[in-house]
Amino acid sequence: MLLRVVLIPLSVLLMATVVSAQDVTLPDIDISGSPDGIVPLPNNTPEVFTNWFSMYTKVVAPNGKPIHLIAQSGWTRDQVLKARNVMEYILESFPGSEYGDNKAAVSNALADRKATMVLFNTPEILREALSGPLGSVTDLSMQDLRANECPAEGDEDYMAHITRDASFEEILHLVQDYGIRPALPKMQKEIEAAHEAMEEKELWESWGDANEYIAVILDNYLDLWTVNPTVYEGRPIEPGRIPEGATHFGAYRAANGRAMLETNDPQGYVLLGKFFPRHLTYTPQLPLDFKGTYSITYDPNVRYTMKAQHLRNVTLRGDNDANLVGNQHTNVLTGNAGDNALQGGAGDDRLNGNGGDDTAVYSGAQADYIVTKHNGFTTVRDERLNRDGVDTLTSIESVKFSDGTVEL
């Protein structure tokens, strides 16, 4: 067994485990019967897995083979969904881009190597598990992610922007090692060149290799450190521990977000644009008990919106009254069984209230809009350019303008 261990300040992260091929593997697991695609490990799963894990989901590659995610009981279903969403975002094709135009080869390479995200509760359990049969007799290509580094959209931790979100970094490690490296050698060489350029400028610590570098700049691209988290792997981050304008505790000193990345690491910034779109492509389903307002418009006074601003679509679940606020992109905002206020903002948005008594919210006076009822939906057209666009409303009972509310 070969363990690749990378040292970073405050902890030791086991970034990947490559094991010699043996006979113990995960069975074919059907997730189609679960509404959220997460199922218990079935009875025919070998004990080497059931001794540690209780939940399973997957992403199916174009070749029909699975990319696995197996989770311990300390993970919430919302966190498992977040991990799968991140995997799907990284692997979703980005039409017109140099490396991401068709990511089928990357996904197939992962599936052929039985790539698996192992979602552990804590680093201590991770080390104990991988020191035994899990790390020596299975044929999986594994990468870990812990519960205390994967806040899910809409949970209390995420909304307060407390915990450092490592889900994009760790899942990209899996994709990098077992997908990009074998399927996109040209991209791998470009990653290595950009990494070397940052080392030469002394803006990147030598503890991390090129695979660490590409994951770190993805974190910056998504503004995960632009507003500093306050907890790292369950431990408070001491004031001043993260130098200003840096991320990963000063290991990456070129930037702490997308704007600085474009200016100070243009080679890395351009590289990301060859594989990743500028926005997050998945649709988070907020927790069943979510209340209040979830906004994907950046507000400097609301900590979580720095990272939420890169979303385009959001779905509410459950039956609590809750609200959604969109951004400048074309948004799909979906309500739940409660009473919802949905505000698309700029762009041509789709607003679906689902159950309850729901309201679409607009920034201008009623006279500025044309409201047209169709068979099964309503359109609201803003006659002023570059403001609210043309929205399509489904299961919306009223429209609120700045000077009053109209029942539909």
Image (tube, rainbow, N blue to C red):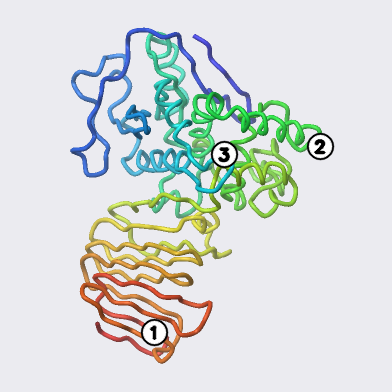
> Reading the chain from its start, which is encountered first: label 1 or label 3?
3
- Asked if residue 56 lies left or right of residue 200, the reply is left
- Asked which quadrant contains residue 44, the reply is top left
Viewer-proximal residue among 134 and 171? 171
* Neighbours of disc 3 within 10 Å: few (<14), some (14-19), many (20+): many
What is the x, y in percent for residue 300?
58, 64
Q: Relative to 206, is 94 above or below?
A: below
As drawn, the label of residue 401 is: 1
Mark toward the start of the polypeptide (1 vs 2): 2
How far apart in space, not on screen, are marks 2 and 3 (Cα)?
26 Å
Using a 10 Å C-alpha cutoff, classify the residue at mark 2 as few (fewer than 14 neighbours), some (14 to 19) or many (20 or more): few
* CA–CA distance in space, label 1 to label 3: 44 Å
Secondary structure under tag 2 reads: loop
Q: Residue furthest bottom?
A: 367
The amino acid pointed to by label 1 is Phe
Q: In the image, which disc is placed on residue 201?
A: 2
> Residue under circle 3?
99
